[in-house]
Image: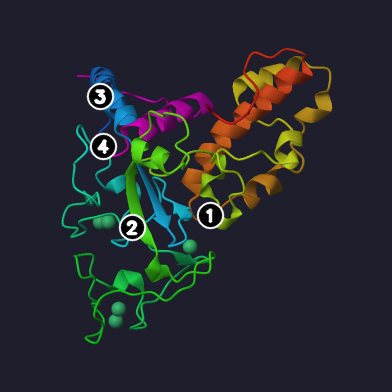
């Protein structure tokens, strides 16, 4: 059978590939599905994914979600969230819910978030880094014999020590019952706790309760560039303000958004900025093909 192909070069092919990758994650075992397999996969997995999505966050004893885990967020086992089991046909009854790592040979039995100190890994009280410890339950240090299991005294931005936080895995219903944001249903694999543009900010910086986040004036006023949605570009091209098509200043704006979890960031940057700017362009044209950006119902 013919495998899916994405012609080299060209933004459309890249977008198509990224869409495929976001949906399939690692479920194709590194070998692209055939078109038939892809359709079959979507038919089987997407309904289950919207029904049984699990939300993953790193929660402070104060109840704040200091970190919302996304597909690229690293686990204590050094593998990413998307490399763990995240899709369930039936959600297990047992709590806490454990999301084991699917990497062959990894001993991680449950996804566990470890904070970073800026870009630096945090140390255990035994002075060794998190990744020097075993990913098997007990989290014993491989580099010394005095460690009784990983324990970080790093202080989170919320003021609480890292060890007082929990990696929490919840269903949509469990989250809603606590008044936590769930965002909109998305077909993508391993979305974890990401519910919107501002999800990637640390808890104390997330100022809105929806998780979607209000766009900054800078975002709304930024020029339309080649990175934007074709719909928006079409609007701009037909508008009478050609100066907005310039690329000046965009590279610095974009690079300032670059973070360790660039992939997650890029995801919402593309999704939401594109949409917001589309709406703005539509307003400028005096038309409103999309509903206004307010909190999701
Ligand atoms: Zn692992
Ligand atoms: Zn893991
Ligand atoms: Zn240790
Ligand atoms: Zn140690
Ligand atoms: Zn915290």
Q: Secondary structure at mark 2?
A: loop
Queried on whether the Cβ of the residue with tag 2 lies below 8 angstroms from ligand 2, the answer reads yes
Tell me the CA gap for discs 4 and 1: 25 Å
Q: Position of residue 197 (x, y in %)?
A: 56, 40
Start-end of magenta stretch: 1-28
Using the image, determine if residue 81 lies above or below residue 28. below
Indicate left or right for 276 with 247 as reference.
Answer: left
Residue placed under numbered mark 1 in the picture: 203
Residue at point 39%, 45% (across, down):
71
Q: Quadrant of residue 92?
A: top left
Mark 3 or mark 4: whose residue is earlier in sequence = 3
Asked whether residue 228 is in view, the answer is: no
Tell me the CA gap for discs 3 and 4: 12 Å
Residue placed under numbered mark 2 in the picture: 75
Residue 247 is tagged as: none
Nearest to the observer: residue 171 or residue 72: 171
């Amino acid at each position: 059978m013919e495998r899916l192909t994405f012609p080299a070069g060209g933004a459309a092919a890249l977008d198509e590939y990224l869409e495929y990758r976001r949906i399939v994650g690692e479920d194709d075992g590194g070998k692209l599905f055939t078109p038939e397999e892809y359709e079959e996969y979507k038919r089987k997995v997407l309904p289950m994914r919207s029904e049984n999505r699990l939300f993953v966050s790193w929660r402070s004893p104060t109840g704040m979600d200091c970190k919302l885990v996304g597909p690229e967020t690293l686990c204590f086992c050094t593998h990413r969230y998307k490399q763990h089991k995240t899709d369930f046909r039936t959600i297990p009854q047992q709590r806490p819910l454990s999301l084991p790592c699917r990497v062959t040979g990894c001993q991680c039995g449950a996804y566990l978030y470890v904070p970073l100190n800026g870009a630096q890994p945090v140390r255990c009280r035994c002075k060794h880094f998190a990744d020097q410890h075993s990913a098997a339950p007990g989290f014993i240090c491989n580099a010394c014999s005095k460690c009784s299991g990983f324990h970080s005294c790093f202080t989170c931005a919320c003021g609480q020590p890292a060890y007082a936080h929990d990696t929490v895995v919840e269903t949509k219903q469990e989250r809603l019952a606590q008044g936590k944001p769930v965002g909109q249903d998305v077909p993508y694999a391993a979305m974890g706790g990401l519910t919107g543009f501002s999800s990637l900010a640390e808890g104390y910086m997330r100022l809105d309760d929806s998780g979607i986040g209000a766009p900054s004036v800078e975002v709304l006023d930024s020029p339309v560039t080649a990175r934007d949605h074709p719909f928006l570009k079409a609007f701009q091209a037909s508008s009478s303000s050609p100066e907005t098509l310039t690329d000046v200043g965009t590279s610095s704006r974009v690079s300032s958004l670059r973070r360790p979890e660039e992939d997650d960031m890029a995801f919402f940057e593309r999704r939401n900025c594109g949409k917001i700017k589309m709406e703005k362009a539509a307003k400028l044209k005096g038309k409103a093909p999309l509903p206004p950006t307010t909190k999701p119902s």
